Amino acid sequence: MEIANNLIDFSKKPIEKRRGIYVPLSLRREIPIKDCGEELVTIENFFTSNGQKVFLSPVWGKNDIPVMLLRQSAVEKLSKAAQKIDRGYFFKVTDAYRPVSLQRKLFGQVCEEVKLGSSHLSEEEIKTKARRFVADPDFGIPPHSTGGAVDLTLVDEFGNELDMGTKIDALDDRVETLSSRITPDQMSNRMFLLESMEKEGFVNLASEWWHYSYGDQYWAAFHGKPAAIYDSL
């Protein structure tokens, strides 16, 4: 996976080439944020009110987040993307808004997992490796804490997931969206999800095939926007 070295060169690349390039948090932090003030909306209620079907499989218990939330525009765009899927598939959402306190808990868990497999690394090296898989809330604004990021995949009417090559949240290099270590059919499924989300303005995180952003600093970096529109909540 290619990593962007600076935002100026990155913004000169065609959109299609930006898909496979990861914008590190160190660059995203350069982008100012002008929060638009949108409120968080319950995904399930929004879809139900529109007569739409969505599968929810939250990774967090109700003690952490009682309902799955996104900002108003983000959930509207997610709904529009779902309406346009034409193969009889549906979205399965596993994660959306996370308060910073929960993001910190998750980052600590991933650091512990990295440490188990790489005990020779220093504490800072462990954190650096963990940041490949989850945002460090002490190192910038976590996308999920803005209410603009969503983790999802595609399922059939019975809830069976399409084969994307890995499960969501796997700690494996194959999770990179354009990984060369997956089959053509798995890549086709990823591209189907990617194109469905991109049409409604979402941006995929190149290091995680399931992660999509709207309104946050990653989204702003990808599109060369002067500022993000969602801050952490």
Image (cartoon, rainbow, N blue to C red):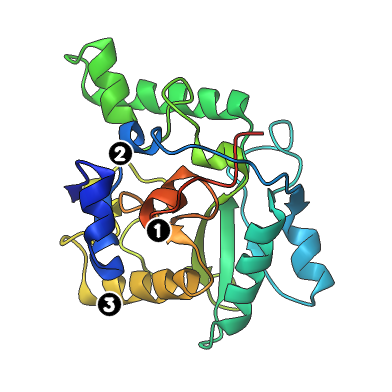
Residue drawn where x is 54% and y is 38% of the image: 33
- State the image coordinates of residue 96 (x, y, percent, origin top left): 60, 48
User: In the image, is residue 158 above or below residue 84?
Assistant: above
Q: Is residue 202 left or right of residue 71?
A: left
Q: Which one is nearer the viewer's eye here, 205 or 90?
A: 205
Q: Give the residue at x 60% y 44%.
A: 230
Q: Residue at x 63, y 80 (%)?
A: 83
Q: Which residue is mark 1?
A: 223
Provide the secondary structure element on which disc 2 rests.
Answer: loop
Three-letter amino acid code of the residue under disc 3: Asp
Q: Quadrant of the C terminus?
A: top right
Whether residue 174 is visible here, answered yes or no, is no
**Quarter of the figure with residue 76:** bottom right
On the image, the x and y values in percent for residue 7 come to 28, 45
Hey, which quadrant is residue 75 in on the image? bottom right
Q: Secondary structure at mark 3?
A: helix
Badge 1 element: helix
Above or below 25: residue 165: below
Q: Report the disc number at residue 185.
A: 3
Viewer-nearest of discs 3 and 1? 1
Residue 78 quadrant: bottom right
Q: Position of residue 170 (x, y in %)?
A: 36, 46
Residue ID for mark 2: 24
Using the numbered discs, state the Cα–Cα distance from disc 2 to disc 1 in whole angstroms.
15 Å
Q: Is residue 101 above or below residue 45?
A: above
Instruction: Give the mark nearest the N terminus, 2 or 1.
Output: 2
Q: CA distance from mark 3 to mark 1?
A: 28 Å
**What's the residue type where badge 2 is placed?**
Pro
Q: Earlier in the sequence, mark 3 or mark 1?
A: 3
CA gap, disc 3 and disc 2: 29 Å
Residue type for callout 1: His
